[in-house]
């Protein structure tokens, strides 16, 4: 059985995604055993940071051998004068799964600082200039098809030492303060930040804190376990299944009564502050009694 996932910025109002799926099904030799899974088709145009975020958060849910096709910013760039500036079709082997994408930085955002098992550039896929008209279908899909048909990456491309690196925006740790940013707003309007649980726990389990954002009157001073910890319509903060700080409204949804982004006035890239009470403060002393 072959599982192929698709992460694109193509939306669903046009024929593009159907063309990708049709080409995949036409090329795979055992059509009865291939399963196509949509991760998302609503990545913002050319936004590889968002594409990596979406895929990175579901990798662990797929079995070994899964092939992830990423077609965001998929047109290759060939720079003969400065090869390091080129973006070539690539295969990444990471966590026993394959990732097929243009090597434009998205692979580095998926891997982060973790180790990976191999990276291959597929330069012969660039031999047909007409393929650049629809590179997702004409360049990347054939690579995914070859993997699904059991062909080794060593037979498809040339193994290289590294991929193009792109740094993501990280939360900043300061004395008695964490300063982060909103990196994603989901379908419900829940706000996800780049502040992870490990960073938060550096200040100690019982240290008082206050989470503030654009509308400071809507601060949050406790971490919940789940949405149900507060009454419907109330704001809360908790660490989600990816270990990232999420700000939400219980039973809130932007398609109905409004999500956290609209009700709290939050937007992508907004700053989120967590101020911790320093040792010896009034709040800390009172918490001892």
Image (spheres, rainbow, N blue to C red):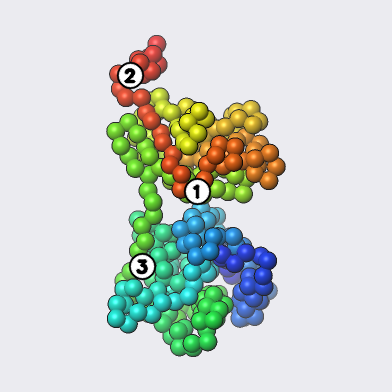
Q: Tell me the mark number nearer the camera, choosing from 1 and 2.
A: 1
Left or right of 177 on screen, residue 190:
right
From this view, report whether residue 210 is shown above or below residue 58.
above
Q: Is residue 23 left or right of residue 266?
A: right
Give how far apart the Cα atoms at labels 1 and 3 are.
25 Å
Residue at mark 1 to residue at mark 2: CA–CA distance: 33 Å
For label 1, count other residues whose C-alpha is less than 10 Å away and answer few (under 14), some (14-19) or many (20+): some
Residue 148: mark in rendering:
none
- Near-viewer residue (15 or 164): 15
SS of the residue under disc 1:
loop
157 relative to 285, above or below: below
Local packing at callout 2 (Cα closer than 10 Å; few below 14, some 14-19, many 20+) is: few
Q: Which residue is mark 3?
A: 164
Q: Earlier in the sequence, mark 3 or mark 2?
A: 3
Image coordinates of residue 84 in percent, x first then y, are: 31, 73
Question: Neighbour class for label 3 at 10 Å: few (<14), some, many (≥20)?
Answer: some
Pair 1/3: label in front = 1
Residue 21 in sight here: no
Image quadrant in which the N terminus is located = bottom right
Q: Which residue is mark 1?
A: 268
Residue at image point 60% right, 62% down = 41
* Residue 210 coordinates in the image, percent (x, y): 43, 28
Image coordinates of residue 260 in percent, x first then y, are 58, 39
Residue at position x 35%, y 16% in the image: 282
| Secondary structure of residue under mark 2 | loop
* Residue at the spot 62% in from the left edge and 45% down from the top edge: 188
Q: Earlier in the sequence, mark 1 or mark 2?
A: 1
Q: Are the residues at dot 3 and dot 2 in contact (C-beta closer than 8 Å)?
A: no
Residue 80 visible: yes
In this figure, which residue is indicated by the disc labeled 2?
281
Q: Are the residues tagged 1 and 3 within 8 Å (C-beta)?
A: no
């Amino acid at each position: 059985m072959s599982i192929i996932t698709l992460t694109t910025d193509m939306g669903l109002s046009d024929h593009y995604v159907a063309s990708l799926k049709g080409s995949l099904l036409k090329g795979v030799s055992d059509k009865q055993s291939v399963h196509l899974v949509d991760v998302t088709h609503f990545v913002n145009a050319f936004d590889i940071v968002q594409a990596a975020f979406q895929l990175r958060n579901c990798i662990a849910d797929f079995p070994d051998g899964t092939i992830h096709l990423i077609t965001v910013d998929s047109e290759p760039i060939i720079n003969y004068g400065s090869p390091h500036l080129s973006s070539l079709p690539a295969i990444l082997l990471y966590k026993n799964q394959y990732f097929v994408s243009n090597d434009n930085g998205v692979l580095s955002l998926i891997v982060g600082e973790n180790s990976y098992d191999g990276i291959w550039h597929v330069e012969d896929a660039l031999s047909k200039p007409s393929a650049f008209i629809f590179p997702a279908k004409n360049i990347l899909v054939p690579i995914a098809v070859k993997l699904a048909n059991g062909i080794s990456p060593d037979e498809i491309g040339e193994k290289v030492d590294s991929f193009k690196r792109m740094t993501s925006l990280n939360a900043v740790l300061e004395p008695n303060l964490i300063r982060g940013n909103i990196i994603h707003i989901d379908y419900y309007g829940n706000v996800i930040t780049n502040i992870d649980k490990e960073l938060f726990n550096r200040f100690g389990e019982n240290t008082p804190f206050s989470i503030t954002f654009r509308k400071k009157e809507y601060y949050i001073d406790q971490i919940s376990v789940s949405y149900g910890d507060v009454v419907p319509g109330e704001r809360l903060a908790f660490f989600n299944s990816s270990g990232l700080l999420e700000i939400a409204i219980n039973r809130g949804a932007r398609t109905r009564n409004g999500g956290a982004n609209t009700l709290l006035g939050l937007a992508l890239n907004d700053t989120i502050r967590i101020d911790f009470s320093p040792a010896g403060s009034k709040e800390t002393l009172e918490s001892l009694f």
